[in-house]
Image (tube, rainbow, N blue to C red):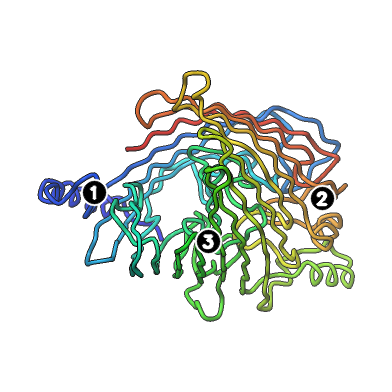
Amino acid sequence: MKMPSCIGGLALATTALLLPALASAQSPEFESWNAKFQSTYVWQGKRPFAAPYSGPNSLTTGKEKSYSFTATGALGFRPWSGAEFYFDPEAAQGVPLSNLTGFGGFTNGEIARTSGPNLTVYRARAFLRQTWGLGGETEMLSSDANQLAGAVDKRRLVLTAGNLSVTDLFDDNAYSHDPRTQFLNWALVTHGAYDFAADARGYTWGAAIEYLGDGWAVRAGRFIQPKEPNGQALDRRIFRHYGDQIEIERSHLIGNLPGKIRLLAYRNRAVMSSFSDALALAGTTGDTPDINAVRTGERSKKGAGINLEQAVTQDTGVFARAMWADGKTETYAYTEIDRSISAGALAKGTAWGRAKDTLGVALARNGLSKVHRDYLAAGGLGFFIGDGRLTYRPEMIVEAFYNVNIVNETSVAFDWQHIRNPAYNADRGPANVFSVRLHTEF
């Protein structure tokens, strides 16, 4: 998946040469192509906290610092009528808190499992979108990253196929979805219990079909899984190992203010370890249970959730999510969370004369299945958590941030996260993490 920097540079240089020739085809209402860019830097500091014991995958009790940096280009054009093609080169580097262990809901949605102190350039997205209009009224789509401005039928069928992130299409939310401008915690970026197919950077290959019309949207997709849990290499056998999801979305108005309700279900199929198998083997051998010792058979993992968003004024909106996953098998591509509930609010600073500023406050409650708890209590380690023993309590997260607009689309955010029972352990914490985020886009 790693793309040499010379290829990314060639793509950008070629685009730059084409810009003057294509400019005549552009207008604010219709784009035959566009080019967008974003850059985000996140600094985090964790305060020391007390704990009577620590394990191999525990959050470090001492003071810590962390950072992440991403820069992404988004290049799009129309190869034929109704079609759009997008290519996103991306560069990233970073050092996580405690080697990315010790939390169910990790504190920086911008940091990938492959992050390191050396800047790496790779292909994040390369996908085709084909739209078939079904007649009736039209609506205007605005120019954005991976979206060309133009008129489309309100009733339409859309096929998206290629290299992208599952959450580009599923579990969207106007108030809690983008760690570059909104909440940072992994449990707030999407459903914490949504173990969607992805490589260690959060991307995959696959296809999804969507129907949109009359206030409804229905979408379904299949995407390939990593060859190993939380790995970078992907298993291309899409008819054998995959992540399926289906989502139903309903738009509505309450007092002329927009809102949406989404129902999402997913099913993963891969070679995954079972917590009960690990416990059974440990009971026979007398050893500590180890999921790596029982990763021998193909298994399924299922989950379902609801996602709500609602504007309450022109400048304020609220959201809520809840998801249940069966929790029988190991975490395969996202967080070590089997039950997740979150809610919060976002408000623009219009009331105090800062219309481009944003204030956000949210809560998240993460939980584990019974067999997952038993595995950790017996000393087992997950990919992200494992204190050697466990006094189980749900992990509770409070996050608040204030985003200050500096100029145009450049902003700096100040963020605080308070995490009780980190990694579901009442014997440890609470942990407090303070963040500064610098973001720009054009």
Q: What is the distance, in whole Å, between disc 2 and disc 3 at their CAs? A: 28 Å
Tell me whether the residue at label 1 lies in contact with that at label 3, contact meaning CB atoms closer than 8 angstroms: no
Q: What is the distance, in whole Å, between disc 1 and disc 3 at their CAs? A: 26 Å
Q: Position of residue 232 (x, y in %)?
A: 50, 60
Q: Earlier in the sequence, mark 1 or mark 2?
A: 1
Pointer 2 local density, CA inside 10 Å: few below 14, some 14–19, many at least 20: some
Pointer 3 local density, CA inside 10 Å: few below 14, some 14–19, many at least 20: many
Pointer 1 local density, CA inside 10 Å: few below 14, some 14–19, many at least 20: some
The residue beneath circle 2 is: 388
Under mark 2, the amino acid is Gly
Tell me whether the residue at label 1 lies in contact with that at label 2, contact meaning CB atoms closer than 8 angstroms: no
Q: Nearer the viewer, residue 89 or 415?
A: 415
The residue beneath circle 1 is: 12
Q: Is residue 74 left or right of residue 347?
A: left
Q: Residue at x 52, y 43 (%)?
A: 256
- The quadrant of the image that shows the N terminus is bottom left
